[in-house]
Image (cartoon, rainbow, N blue to C red):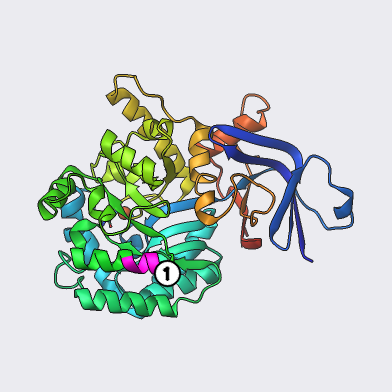
């Protein structure tokens, strides 16, 4: 029996807007599974070694619920166009490079290392359409200690010459990929890129595969006005964008839809009623001039909202930065709404970045007993303050401002996957 005991200022988000703070607390895991957070160490663990982190913060690690691995090489570039032009000018040519498996290996190894170094230990991620590169991505994530879901992208139209598959190829390669996926912590997710990239025939088949194999689904929804207009041209039978997924069996409580910036009341009701997950990608929504999603309203309506970096529409891999961006975005939205909507508080945004996706991964929010240990140890002793800060103040500050090399260690699924030199 392997026991991990971390001692420090343990902070977790058990529900939206609530923080549990235990100063000098013990976070205990046995065989990688959390037993509890204790103010005094239970007697049964008295003889176990304790990793004393002093005054460091012990936080939940992040779930990045929407990002594009093959866009990693263009991170921070090409921010001068809206979505559709951006896809054709920069993104598709970049993704086409992942036909080259050596390039994929090198890129994905570095991406996986950067994710864990930034405290992201769970993902819901897009690969490219390439089966081999997708398997390499899954392997590199698994090795680095990232857990979650990865999808081979499907796109049988509108990709251009270098990034398109025929309908038959797309189905065959998807089925083959699913047969070849044998990883412990990385599982497959069905991934039609978005409606303009997939014919009806392909979408129907993907919906059928997801249903038969009981797989989750991820895609994009109502990100940008031009995209929405394009979808309505392609699907005159559908009143709204979401119906193009729903009619193909891809609209359920394991469907993850990125953006939803322009989802109106009717579309949001369809999201809520089906239990679809919305991934808010605040950085990307600004970079690609898409808009400010009404996230606070969605939460009030009972929609399941989580956060995504959406690299490389988003330019920040650190979910600390993505969390801060989601707060700023909610304030911009408040301005647009004539101050009639609330903004996200720091602890609310933190919940979205950490606990909110727990149900998607079959876990409970916070450091709940039974959850696999996913945690960040964060040092903040080298930032000047005018007085001694409370743990809650230190927590709030760390979202916006961290010292150099603040992350001391990262644990994923019970394993230490990163340690600062
Ligand atoms: N819609 C379809 N593909 C993409 C993509 O790669 N990024 C973003 N932000 N939106 C998309
Ligand atoms: Fe995206």
Q: Secondary structure at mark 1?
A: helix
**Is residue 103 shown to the viewer in this render?**
no
Task: Tell me: residue 271, above or below residue 86.
Answer: above
**Residue at 35% of width from left, 54% of height from top?**
311
| Residue 416: % across, % down | 65, 62
**Residue at 57% of width from left, 37% of height from top?**
15
| Residue 350: % across, % down | 52, 39
**Pointer 1: what residue?**
213
The one nearer the camera, 367 or 206, is 206
**Residue at 49% of width from left, 53% of height from top?**
360
Instruction: Give the quarter the ligand 1 occupies.
Output: bottom left
| Residue 383: % across, % down | 60, 36
Q: Predominant secondary structure in magenta?
A: helix
The one nearer the camera, 234 or 315, is 234
Q: Which residues are magenta?
A: 208-213
**Left or right, 344 with reference to 376:** left
Look at the image and tell me in which quarter the N terminus lies: bottom right
């Amino acid at each position: 029996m392997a026991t991990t005991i971390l001692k420090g200022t343990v902070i977790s988000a058990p529900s939206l807007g609530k923080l549990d703070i235990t100063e000098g607390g013990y976070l205990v895991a046995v065989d990688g599974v959390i037993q509890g957070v204790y103010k005094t160490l239970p007697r049964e663990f008295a003889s176990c070694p304790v990793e004393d982190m002093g005054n460091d913060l012990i936080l939940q690690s992040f779930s990045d619920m929407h990002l594009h691995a093959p866009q990693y090489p263009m991170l921070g570039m090409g921010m001068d166009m809206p979505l559709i032009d951006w896809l054709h000018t920069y993104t598709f040519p970049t993704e086409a490079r992942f036909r080259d498996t050596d390039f994929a290996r090198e890129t994905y190894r570095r991406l996986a290392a950067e994710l864990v170094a930034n405290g992201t230990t769970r993902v819901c991620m897009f690969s490219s359409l390439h089966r081999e590169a997708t398997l390499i991505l899954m392997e590199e994530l698994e090795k680095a200690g990232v857990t979650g879901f990865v999808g081979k992208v499907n796109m049988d139209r509108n990709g251009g010459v270098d990034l398109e598959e025929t309908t038959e190829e797309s189905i065959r390669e998807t089925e083959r990929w699913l047969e070849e996926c044998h990883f412990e912590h990385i599982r497959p997710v069905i991934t039609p890129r978005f409606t303009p990239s997939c014919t009806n025939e392909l979408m129907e088949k993907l919906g059928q595969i997801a249903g038969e194999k009981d797989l989750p689904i991820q895609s994009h929804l109502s990100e940008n006005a031009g995209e929405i207009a394009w979808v309505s041209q392609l699907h005159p039978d559908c009143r709204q964008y979401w119906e193009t997924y729903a009619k193909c069996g891809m609209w359920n409580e394991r469907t993850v839809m990125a953006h939803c910036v322009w989802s109106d009341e009717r579309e949001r009701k369809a999201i809520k009623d089906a239990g679809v997950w919305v991934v808010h990608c605040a950085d990307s929504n600004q970079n690609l001039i898409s808009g400010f999603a009404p996230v606070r309203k969605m939460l009030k309506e009972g929609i399941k909202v989580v956060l995504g970096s959406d690299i490389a529409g988003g330019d920040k891999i650190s979910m600390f930065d993505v969390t801060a961006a989601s707060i700023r975005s909610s304030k911009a939205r408040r301005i647009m709404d004539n101050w009639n909507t609330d903004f996200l508080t720091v602890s609310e945004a933190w919940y979205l970045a950490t606990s909110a996706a727990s149900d998607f991964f079959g876990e409970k929010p916070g450091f709940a007993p039974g959850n696999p240990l996913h945690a960040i140890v964060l040092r903040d002793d080298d930032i000047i303050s005018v007085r001694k800060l409370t743990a809650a103040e230190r927590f709030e500050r760390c979202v916006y401002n961290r010292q150099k090399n603040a992350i001391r260690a990262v644990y994923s699924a019970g394993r230490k996957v990163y340690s600062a030199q």
